[in-house]
Amino acid sequence: MNGGRPVSDSLAVVSGPTPPRAARAGTPSHAFREWVPLPTAILTGPPAAGTPSPLADDLRALGFQVADADTPAAVAARLAAAPAAERVAVVDRRFVGHRHALRLALTDPRFDAGAVPGALAVTPAARPALAQALAALTAPAEVPAAPQSTGGPGYAEGPRPYEPAAADSVPDTLADALAEHGTAPHRPELGVLVARVAHDEAERQAAEQAVAGVDEESVRLRSAVKSRDGFFTTHFISPYSRYIARWCARRGLTPNQVTTASLLVALIAAGCAATGTRAGFVAAGVLLLASFVLDCTDGQLARYSLQYSTLGAWLDATFDRAKEYAYYAGLALGAARGGDDVWALALGAMVLQTCRHVVDFAFNEANHDATANTSPTAALSDRLDGVGWTVWVRRMIVLPIGERWALIAVLTAVSTPRITFVVLLVGCALAACYTTAGRVLRSLTRRAVRTDRAAQALADLADSGPLARGTARLLAPFARRLPAFAPPALAAVGAGALAATAALAPRGSWWVVPLAVLYVLTSGLAVARPLRGALDWLVPAFFRAGEYGTVLALAAVSQVNGALPAAFGLVAAVAYHHYDTVYRIRGGTGAPPDNLVRAAGGHEGRALLVAVLSAALAGRSGLTAALTVLAAVLALLVLTESIRFWVSSGAPAVHDEPGEPA
């Protein structure tokens, strides 16, 4: 997708003590039919100077019930009385600023704690830390007594409770205390937004003038758009999709609903392409672009209303792949209606695109927490970022989702599916060469020291099954003596030999089976030691190319009716498993359960099984049936576990991502 992904926040599901005011903030009227526990905002500190403050109204519009507490001890009592499962905010009565500044600090569900000057909020997970900070703040302390009339030194009269000075802000003091105890609050980038604590009337007037000088809604709309996006998305989609996102927010639509709508539009586009008519192809191209607009809108809606969730992140990432690959299948079906078989090209496009993504994920996982992670090529890239036009050129060269879908849509409408796939394959191949070459150069010129976490992430991405793991255990002593470049070299040799044999051997040849056994051996040896080498991030991509390429080649060579569509389904099911692994790793939970990985056979086990099936069922329709059954079993296996995990409470919080979409 084009942004991070969401579930509804307090704005969409709660009512305030004064529903009409919240309703004017954009919450649909049906949200007030049922009263539910509200997050609590505790106002504390000296009263605001000057005219009555709109602070309480702003907090209610954000979905909070407002309570007062004059002292830190009273704040602690209010905190203890608040519902245990709800968010709690502490706000200085003297706060002056934009409502969106409060929204960013107090309602973002991605962080356990958030703060801006004069305001702090914590989720239930961080409430014990806040209670501890309040206890330390209110603990009695020995203070010196006033000097006696005799002029002798004063002595402590006994413990006195903490009494904040007029200049102190209790929320700021608590935020600093949380940071000292390891629960550092997230402090959002405010830009031109204002968030201040006004200590007197002059400061208040100055802050109010600063607030009035900023168009808050314009800032909110701009912040809904990703800071780093592709050229096509930035200049041809986001200028109006952000307003669609606001329209959705004001009508109570959630990002997940927009994501689902994007999927449905893309599936309709695939159906139009499958008709094989010129009108169908034109409609498919238009609908694919419409689906992409909604794909941008869901992330912008999430950022506009701060509605992020694990389920939303999973839906968005999964649906992006489903939309694109379903559209490939639709094009292939449409071409078949016109007498042109392009299933091999469609499957090749899916293989290439998935391998590109694996390279991206593996490189990032290997390097994002590495130490001494600098190189001359990285420094050159940073310098080029300062030259405006080079930034856009380099973003377009990598053919991100916006440029790629625009290319597919236009070619679908004006040409044939074969031309569309050929151009797409050439463009993606050039993009893959550009990005991979740059990353290889960076890896060879930097002296990065990779962590155990990175090595484990690469091992999880490798998707080794029982055969490769058993081989790795047997050959571990030998693997330790191999040179540093051995893992990617072994993976490349094994995958290349198997895929080449599958493509070049005659139909039904049993030569592919011993090559598949060799692939098992090289795969096990490649992962027999931790993947910490400079180029070890290439190992998972070589495995993907070996497995997917073998399935493609064997299905194409078999010349069995329906074998290529069945192979397309098989690769799609396996690719889903690999994407699911990626997003679990990004969320910090590691790979899917080991029993699932074993049951799925691992990449080497599946490659060996398909090799045996292709040799045993050469030239017979049984190959199509076997591939179809294998695809269905794998899809059922991985989807069941994936859905169970992502809708469970233990799923990770996936944050919004600033980079270009894949």
Image (spheres, helix red, strand yellow):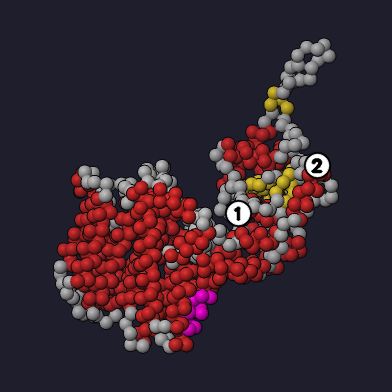
The answer to whether residue 258 of the structure is visible from this angle is: no
Which residue is denoted by mark 1 in the rendering?
Answer: 108
Q: Which amino acid does label 2 sit on?
A: Asp
Indicate whether 113 appears above or below 62: above
Q: How far apart are marks 1 and 2 (CA)?
A: 30 Å
Rendered-image quadrant of the C terminus: bottom left
Front position in the image: 10 or 38: 10
Q: Nearer the viewer, mark 1 or mark 2?
A: 2
Which residue is denoted by mark 2 in the rendering?
Answer: 200
Where does residue 549 sit, x and y in percent of width and height? 28, 67
Asked if the stretch drawn in magenta spans residue 285, the answer is: yes
Q: In this view, does 134 lie to the left or right of 388?
A: right
Q: In this view, does 162 lie to the left or right of 187?
A: right
Where does residue 121 sit, x and y in percent of width and height? 64, 48
The magenta region covers: 282-290
Front position in the image: 646 or 351: 351
Q: In this view, does 94 lie to the left or right of 254?
A: right
Q: Residue at point 57% right, 37% down? A: 181
Provide the secondary structure element on which disc 2 rests: loop
The answer to whether residue 345 of the structure is visible from this angle is: yes
Q: Are marks 1 and 2 in contact (CB under 8 Å)?
A: no
Location of residue 404 by image quarter: bottom left
Name which of mark 1 and mark 2 comes first in the sequence: 1
Where does residue 607 sit, x and y in percent of width and height? 25, 65
Front position in the image: 592 or 576: 576
Front position in the image: 372 or 104: 372
Location of residue 494 by image quarter: bottom left
Q: Residue at point 37% right, 63% down? A: 432
Q: What residue type is labelled 1?
A: Asp
Q: Residue at point 30% right, 73% down? A: 567
